[in-house]
């Protein structure tokens, strides 16, 4: 029996993955911000008779302190973790720049910083597994650049641009994770599911006409969750042997793409560590590899 953490496992792609592994006999911990969605998830596990292996943890992952709490909770409950899957997201595009109570841009906090903190913070407990995997569901294989002088999009904020920028930050996060991993046991996979018909995608659109159009487009170009998760399941069951890999659905994405530039990955890593130190969420001398200390 494997122990699998799925952030954003109460809805959409994450829930599909969580349910698959629960049905298969694994232990699955899901994290989401809404306790109502958590209750729905737990009810479904009861109906399937798998509730003994299902755990829901309520947390607002846009806050670093909540990610820290989850790391501490998991480390105290489990000796090892076999798989960590990052799916927590909000498809909502803010009209204006807005910050979390910790002073980070909201989308930056949830889509990038949470994955940075959880990935490095759970490294030790993952390394206790025989064949640990981190699978980051994001959007590798797309072009674009990271503005290293403004990683939180403070100047000329645009909600759509911030989302794309967040995807590029995650490309570099995968590279930085592999670069900083001297143990070399964890396989880090960046995965792009392409268009998936999740309710989160549609609920985020306020204009009813745009919403109907998006539903129509996704009906044509997108996939239902059950189908979209199949290549993810395959990768989680038979992970690639390389420390870092990237996929767009079943097609491997070349790590020679500019979006995976090693120097930029190092710069982003350094800037992220500085940001976390600056907010005093971590003590002076903070080391991302010892996040829960
Ligand atoms: N759907 C697509 O077409 C598509 C395309 C490319 C990439 N992706 C990527 O695939 C991943 C999953 O997307 P999805 O469409 O499945 O998303 P979704 O259906 O909207 O589900 C998002 C999940 O994240 C949780 N979440 C949202 N805000 C949170 C917060 N502050 N703290 C903790 N959990 C939070 C949600 O639960 P609560 O609401 O309870 O918090 C939910 O479980 C994302 O990383 C996304 O970027 C999706």
Image (cartoon, rainbow, N blue to C red):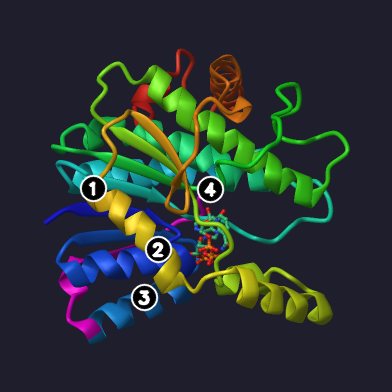
Badge 2: residue crowd in 10 Å (few <14, some 14–19, many ≥20): many
Q: Tell me what residue is drawn at x 45 percent, y 13 percent.
A: 285
> How would you rate the neighbour count of disc 4 (Cα within 10 Å): few for under 14, some for 14-19, many for 20 or more?
many
What separation in Å lies between label 1 and label 4 (alpha carbons)? 20 Å
Question: Who comes first in sequence, dot 4 or dot 2?
Answer: 4
Q: Which residue is mark 3?
A: 41
Judge whether residue 288 is colored magenta.
no
Residue under pointer 1: 238
Mark 4 C-beta closer than 8 Å to ligand 1:
yes
Extent of the magenta region: 48-61
Numbered circle sitting on residue 138:
4
Quick check: can you spot residue 99?
A: no
* 85 shown above or below 210: above
The CA distance from mark 3 to mark 4 is: 23 Å
Q: CA distance from mark 4 to mark 2?
A: 13 Å
**Callout 1 touching callout 4 (CB < 8 Å):** no
């Amino acid at each position: 029996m494997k122990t699998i953490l799925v952030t954003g496992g109460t809805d959409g792609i994450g829930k599909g993955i969580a349910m698959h592994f629960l049905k298969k006999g694994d232990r699955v911990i899901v994290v989401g911000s809404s306790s109502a969605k958590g209750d729905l998830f737990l009810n479904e596990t009861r109906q399937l008779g798998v509730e003994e292996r299902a755990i829901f943890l309520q947390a607002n992952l846009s806050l670093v302190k909540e990610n820290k709490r989850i790391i501490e909770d998991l480390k105290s409950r489990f000796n090892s973790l076999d798989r960590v899957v990052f799916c927590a997201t909000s498809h909502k595009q803010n009209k204006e720049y807005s910050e979390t109570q910790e002073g980070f841009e909201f989308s930056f906090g949830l889509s990038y910083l949470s994955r940075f903190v959880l990935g490095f913070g759970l490294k030790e407990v993952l390394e206790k597994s025989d064949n640990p995997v981190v699978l980051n569901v994001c959007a590798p294989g797309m072009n674009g650049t990271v503005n290293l002088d403004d990683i939180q999009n403070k100047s000329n904020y645009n909600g759509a641009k911030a989302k794309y920028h967040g995807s590029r930050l995650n490309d570099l996060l995968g590279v930085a994770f592999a670069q900083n991993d001297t143990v070399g046991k964890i396989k880090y996979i960046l995965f792009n599911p392409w268009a998936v018909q999740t309710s989160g995608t549609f609920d985020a659109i306020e204009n009813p006409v745009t919403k109907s159009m998006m539903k129509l487009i996704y009906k044509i170009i997108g996939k239902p969750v059950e189908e979209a998760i199949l290549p993810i399941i395959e990768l989680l069951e038979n992970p690639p042997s390389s420390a870092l890999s990237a996929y767009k659905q079943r097609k491997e994405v070349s790590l020679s793409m500019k979006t995976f530039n090693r120097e930029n990955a190092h710069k982003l890593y350094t800037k992220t560590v500085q940001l976390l130190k600056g907010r005093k969420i971590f003590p002076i001398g903070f080391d991302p590899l010892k996040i829960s200390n």
